[in-house]
Amino acid sequence: MNDVYNGPTLALLSILVAVFAALYLRSRTQRRLLWLLGWSITALRLSLQISNFGSHGLGLAISYLCLELGPLMFLASMSTNSAVRSGTFKWIAIFTIPMAVYISMHVLVPHQGAAVHFTAVASVIALEAIAITWTVRCKVFPVGLRMFFSIVAAPVCLYMAWTGEAMRLLSLIHSAICLVAALLVLITYRRISPGVVFTATGLITWGLPFFVMSAIPSSSPRLALFISLLNIAKAVTAIGMVVLVLEDEIRVNEIAQKRDRRARAEMEQYSKLFLAATPNRDFGIQYQMICDVITRASRFSRAAILLRNVEQTFQVFGSSGMEPSLAQALSAFARCLTARTMDENCRATSTALPQSMTRVFDLRGMDGNAEALRSLGVDSIYAIPIRSASDIVQGAVFLHGLRWPSEPLEGEDLLPLELLVSRLMAAHENNMLLRRVVQSEKMAGLGQLTGGVAHELNNPLTVVMGYAELIAEGGTDEVTRDYASVIRREAHRMRQTIESLARFWKASPDELASISVEQMLRDIEQLRRPEFERAGITLLLTVADGLPRIRANGDQMRQVLLQVLNNATAALKNTPANQPKQVRIDARLGQDKVQVLVRDSGPGFSDINRVFDPFFTTKAPGEGTGLGLSLCYSIIREHGGEIVLSNLQPHGAAVSIEIPIDKTTDTVFAS
């Protein structure tokens, strides 16, 4: 009679095994592999039941073992706990060993003595321990089900093992595995669909033998009807799983299409951003606007753009979607990030996705600088590094607040942002280059103008000074001689201004020599410290160890540094009494250049784009000509270096001077 029902079922399952093999080859997931193994084992059991080999001895033992292992594969495939899922095959192997021992004790051992009996009981105890441990670790189960299994099911199984009811115990274990697998299908998919309904219904029906056989006598014709129903349940379960795979693929395709549409819409928003810097717009890139667009178009509700400043730390140039407390904490965190720390984190931290530029900063592994962010619930940040053409990290786009967290982050979600960051880096470098070009062109034009003016005014001033000298020497009355002295004095002051203009036009660094930057700074510190102390200004000097020498004109370099210190001193005169007055000088090695950074705690530059213009000054009339920083720019430019000005946050100013190192010496220095 069984052949009548098992033959067609075996043929159908064999076809479905081939279907599952094709599905696994299409997408090699662990769940599909377990389904393929489960149905292969179920088909093997049916073939053993049909053949004579499965009716006695080893064949019968294998058949009983397949009875339990087939549904066990389906149960194991439904685990959503990563800790359990990673060791799925280990759990299956651990469960199989005591199960095989128990079946062997009752099928292969002819004499059921005390040793065999106790071995079988010990095997059941091991099975219960494994099942309880797995149930506890697989936290998707409700607490009530865990308690039921531990308090009720385990003692019942142990009682059956002790009383020698082997077939009923195997039937109970089989039913329990099928019912728990059905429950996991409902918990895992959490939806009502044909695939879920067919699979869960088939597993539930497949798990009824213990209860039905306990209620229906073995001689009843209804038992044969139930056996046929079991075969139908197996086919329904297999078909349901195939439908589940198709439903998942349809859902994945729909999500992919939705993600693709969202990525295109996001890229359209980014393409509308104007990132080019123009001189008439103060060379500014609208970082705040970029952050606003990111939070509107991307999957992240919070965004911030950090860029490196002259202090070699980072500053928040724009942010969006952040509360004031979070923005303040992020700004403090950025100021504590050095260029080296940022570069190390961008290279060492794990990527958000394979083949992705985006990194994940785990703030829990960082020092106390991230404590304020962690206290606000920010434990990790997505960061897209902004790298220059020379692969130096110039900044980063920080992202947080992932929208739709249940939907996994994919490459399509990050690609538009990474393309935007690439555009942003190009715009940032173009911005810096445009600043230098415009400044150079402006200084070149002013240089030619001042050179011509100096040449044209020099001769008339010589005549004026000569006649004033004659009048002062040959004047007959005191008033005339006083007037002549005034003319001569003011003409001499005009001559000094013209000489400054001439130096600005052609600040050639004659008499270059190898100079120790550390010694020069120590001398300047010793010279100016008494003056700073009288003015109540704290002067701090820090020089990096092993700083290389530079090749420059010593007098001109001292003139530049003294001019910068004079400007810092003047800026601190109007500092409020409750605000500390401080000037810091830091000397360190950059890329083939020595950087001298002078910072003050004053109000900063009022118009930073005009500071280098000749005759531009914020001082009162008569206190300065406005040529100091212009001359400094010319001197540094002629030395092949660079001078950069910056306003600090929340107040203060910084002047960064970079001079190429002297490569003609054999000085050994530490990098």
Image (cartoon, rainbow, N blue to C red):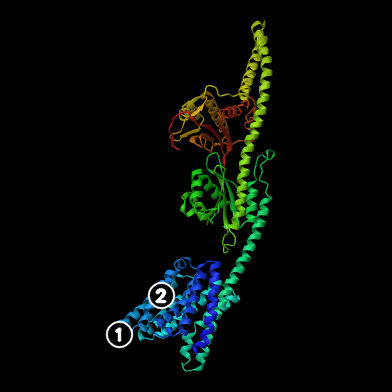
The amino acid type, in three-letter code, at marker 2 is Thr
Q: Is residue 161 above or below residue 291?
A: below
Secondary structure under badge 1?
A: loop
Q: Nearer the viewer, residue 467 or 630?
A: 630
Residue 479 appears in the rendering = no
- Between 319 and 484, the one lying in front of the other is 319
Q: Residues within 10 Å of mark 2 (few under 14, many from 20)?
A: some
Q: Residues within 10 Å of mark 1 (few under 14, many from 20)?
A: few
Mark 2 element type: helix
What percent of the width, then of the height, locates residue 418?
A: 59, 51
Q: Is residue 518 above or below residue 114?
A: above
Asked whether residue 421 is in view, the answer is yes
> What residue is drawn where x is 55% and y is 39%?
310
Q: Position of residue 654 (x, y in %)?
A: 55, 36
Vertical side of 649 occupied by 551: above or below: above
Report whether 558 appears left or right of 416. left
Residue underneath mark 2: 96
Q: Which residue is mark 1?
A: 113
Q: Position of residue 626 (x, y in %)?
A: 63, 27
Residue ID at (64%, 7%) = 473
Residue 599 is tagged as: none
| Disc 1 to disc 2: CB gap under 8 Å | no
Q: Is residue 332 left or right of residue 296?
A: left
Q: Amino acid at mark 1?
A: Gly
* Residue sitting nearer the eye, 240 or 375: 240
Q: Nearer the viewer, residue 651 or 181?
A: 181
| Distance between the alpha carbons at the discs numbered 1 and 2 | 23 Å
Quadrant of the rendering where the C terminus is positioned: top left
Specify which label sits upstream in the sequence, 1 or 2: 2
